[in-house]
Image (spheres, rainbow, N blue to C red):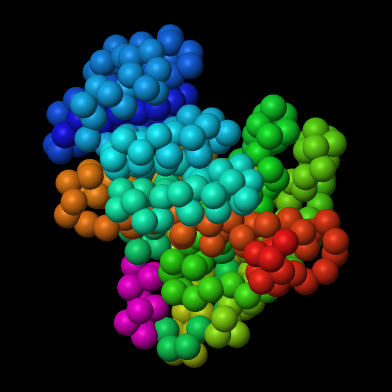
Amino acid sequence: MRIGILGLGRIGAFHAETLSGLDAVESLVLTDPFADAAKAAAEKFGGEVVDSPEALLSAGVDGIVVAAATDAHPALILAGVEAGIPVFCEKPVAKRMSEGVRVLEAVRDTGVPIQIGYNRRFDAGFAAARAAVQAGELGALHTVRSTTLDPAPPPAAYVAVSGGIFRDCSVHDFDIIRWVTGREVTEVYAVGGNRGADYIKEAGDADTTGAILTLDDGTLAVVSNSRHNARGYDVRMELHGFRDSIAVGLEDKLPLRSVEPGVTFPAGTPHDFFMDRFTAAYRAELAAFTEVVAGSRPSPCTVEDALEAGWIAEACTLSLHEHRPVSIAEVRGA
């Protein structure tokens, strides 16, 4: 099949490399506002360069991958759907939830599949955890812990437009908690602090946060995030039930150092970048999209799924600023 990629920055170029190695993909069509970025990707991974999204959509593509700036996501999703072309879009659907809801309303009954890029759903460890929960191996859950710790903060320009740590970082934890447990979040309480880069505080954001999520069956989920984890990129989940407890991410590249006498775990070089930690998941995610394009499977992460994670992020952001518990129903009705 022929796949178009809109946006050839860091993640777009990574997707171009991944897609170029998939058997189902015969050719790529590339476009980026910065022509040199598209040309560089074409030279490295192959593909035809066009000068606009309109030209790409009319170039006979079977599916499109949207890896452009967040502000462009709604318009590009809608353009792909209007053209009847299946869409893969990096998260979020839109910068603001009101925009995301409008996208959902516009695409809901079109029949054109849309897959949103929450790659942890394609990580082997998270998939095994979901299977264990579904099989009842843990019994009823009582506690979930989910962690995303970045090795260093993003640049000031990114922080200024990201919408905050809950919307651009924690949202991955929120999505994977929903997906693994099969439950919905009903209420949150969030706190945060600033112990590092001054520009994060100046942007009105926190660099380290914690959130307690109450799930609809009473399970408590604890989410911990930070922009400052000097040892590396740390993504983990623990699930504790009345029969058993399991963990995702406890492997030799875990960026954590034990000080227990005689303990040699973890023994490997710590993960230092999200692309290192989730290379296989990204590949599986895009391979799944080719199946969506072929019509052999439904979208594994819909616009509706993405908006549910977004509502949790909205609730946590409000909770942080107002120092109080916030229900998901409250932010939905705002």
Query: Which residue is at 27% across, 58% downward?
Result: 298
Relative to residue 283, is residue 267 drawn left or right?
right
Report the number of numbered marks. 0
- Residue in front for this viewpoint, 43 or 128: 43
Name which quarter of the figure residue 331 lies in. Answer: bottom right
Name which quarter of the figure residue 192 lies in. Answer: bottom right
Residue 13 x, y percent position in the rendering: 39, 26
Query: Which residue is at 64% across, 57% downward?
Result: 313
Q: Is residue 106 visible?
A: yes
In the displayed structure, would residue 217 be above or below residue 260?
Answer: below
Quadrant holding the N terminus: top left
Relative to residue 137, is residue 24 drawn left or right?
left
Q: Is residue 147 visible?
A: no
Q: Is residue 235 magenta?
A: no
Residue 130 x, y percent position in the rendering: 38, 70
Residue 103 x, y percent position in the rendering: 50, 48
Relative to residue 90, is residue 208 drawn left or right?
right
Query: Which residue is at 72% across, 29% downward?
Result: 156
In the displayed structure, would residue 132 be above or below residue 306?
Answer: below
Quadrant holding the C terminus: bottom right
- Residue in front for this viewpoint, 84 or 314: 84
Residue 180 x, y percent position in the rendering: 43, 69
In the displayed structure, would residue 319 be above or below residue 61?
Answer: below
Query: Which residue is at 51% across, 80% downward?
Result: 240
Give the residues in magenta.
128-137
Main SS, magenta residues: helix
- Residue in front for this viewpoint, 310 or 189: 310
